[in-house]
Image: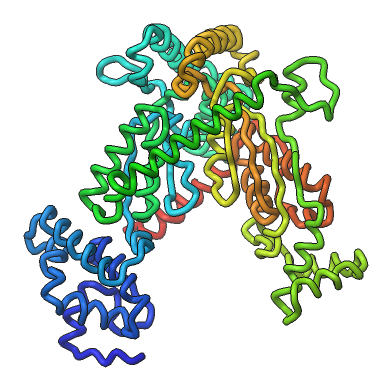
Amino acid sequence: MKENLSEEQKKTIEPFVSSTENSIFVLRNLPEVVMGALFSRYSRSPKTLRQLLLEEFISDEKTGFNEIVSFQTGKGIKQAVAIKKAEEFYDRVLLGFGDDSVAELGGAHLAVENVSNISVKLIQDARLGISPLEKSTRYVFFDEKDKKGNYSYFKPKELMESSFADEYIELCDSLFSAYSKFLEPMTKFIKEKNPQEENISDRAYNSTVKAKACDVLRVFLPASTLTNTGLYGNGRAFEYLISRLSSYPLEETKSIAKEMHSELSTYIPSFVKRSFGEFGEPTIQFLSETREQTKKVSEEILENEKPLFEKRQVAKTKEEAEESEEVVLIDFDKDAEEKILSAILYSSSHLSMEQIKEKIKSLSEEQKKKILSAYVGERKNRRHKPGRAFENSFYTFDILGNYGIFRDLHRHRILTQERQLLSTEHGFVSPVEFDSVGVKEEYTSLMKQAKDLFEKIEEKNPWQAQYAVPFGYKIRWYMKMNLREAFHFCELRSSKQGHADYRRIAKKISEEIKRVHPTLSEEMKFVDKKEYSLERLEAEKAQDEKIKEVGEKYKK
């Protein structure tokens, strides 16, 4: 519909929109809660967004709009007053035509610092509504001490008040000390093995070597290692995250939840106020009780069972058996081809899915390949992904990999992942470089020390025992993904700049899919199966080119 706004009206709303004329524009200079409420009202009104903003928000004195936005536009109103007014405004709007989903229309950037690797993974379990970024073990050395001489690891209250406190501190200090001690010799070894070539800049070469050294030595780091994560999320997602973190049997996550709630309440109070209280507390109790009940019934059912290893390959030792089951395809869609082909044809016809499936059964292999070829097209790079029809086929993989691998692959959210508690049950990996640098003996000794302490703590505190487990120990988790996600996952995580460990997982997953569905996986052609000694080198060379381009673009 036509807005027909006067010039005066346009001037009134101009500070809050990127355009007073265009059909597509950005809202600006408004608190998140106001933008969320505005969009919610928008869904139930025949008016344009600019008309709504002008007539029902700016011009209505009851909304307190002027006081709300004056802080945003620098008129001197205190932030606390603006936030309070915004919250009152939100409550009135919600009462008038409320929908909880309004909380998805406003969000916040939240920094979460100095938390353990155990808690950060629980934070990042959120699949929808929150986008995380985390401090990398690949580009940052973890060898520094704070002003008090302490390494960067978390000291959980439950352990510090237990008889294991001294052993825990001794273990973590020893792990960090070894990590720090071997940084220089490992870096030297990598340089000797991979000398700098003439066409490689010092910046690119040194960055690549640093990444490699960090990749190799991260197996020393305990899961208690402190890290930082940045989160951008909508209000509804943060509300549930706070409740979920409060439900875990860890003092750390409960404390994080309270701090999150406190800080977000200074910015989007209306969106997170139900994390606790009348609605939040029952949710926290529900999550906690179902988790505990499931644990009890699992122990009851599986009481006498011990971990067995897949016998698809003959293995002489436990280590060989575990290597053979690093990636095991335990379930897949037997009718995948029929389902995907039917979904492809469905969107280009007016037939029912049932009719199309019957037709698919009569097609020749050549005709089926013709359909797939047309649908997938000529993929020129991994970003050219097949369409949603490929989401009709599912694969479930049981993964056994070191905790470092899990941390890297955990960030994939468009699939289902569920992990077991981190333990020392499945042994640990030992990087091949350790043999050449004289690291293995000390590393093996420390891993045994970690296992001994873990087993003592686990008897009474399995959740807290995880803090003592180094990244080198293996963890089990499963991944269930559709074929479309598998294309993305395998091609991205096998790319040459990736960590050698998770590249191996990605390649094995692609091989398993190819084994059961050779035709469907035929176009998964950007899986990089080569091996590289310096994985980051090409990416760093490309970074040099970008630095050069930006320098030339903005030179004065």
Asked if residue 393 lies left or right of residue 493, the reply is right
Residue 323: x and y in percent read 73, 25
Q: Answer whether residue 505 is visible to the viewer in this image.
A: yes
Give residue 529's quadrant in the image: top right
Residue 547: x and y in percent read 44, 50
View extreme (left): residue? 76
Give residue 226's quadrant in the image: top left
Asked if residue 204 lies left or right of residue 65, the reply is right
Residue 415: x and y in percent read 60, 49
Does 496 appear above or below 101? above
Q: Which residue sits at x=56%, y=7%? A: 445
Number of marks present in the image shown:
0
Does 258 appear above or below 178? below
Q: Which residue sits at x=59%, y=46%? A: 416
Along the line of sight, the residue nearer the viewer: 183 or 131: 131
Q: Which residue sits at x=15%, y=77%? A: 60
Give residue 371's quadrant in the image: bottom right
Residue 122: x and y in percent read 45, 37
Along the line of sight, the residue nearer the viewer: 13 or 217: 13
Q: Quadrant of the N terminus?
A: bottom left
Along the line of sight, the residue nearer the viewer: 325 or 241: 241
Q: Answer whether residue 430 is visible to the viewer in this image.
A: no
Q: Quadrant of the C terminus?
A: bottom left
Asked if residue 132 lies left or right of residue 365, the reply is left
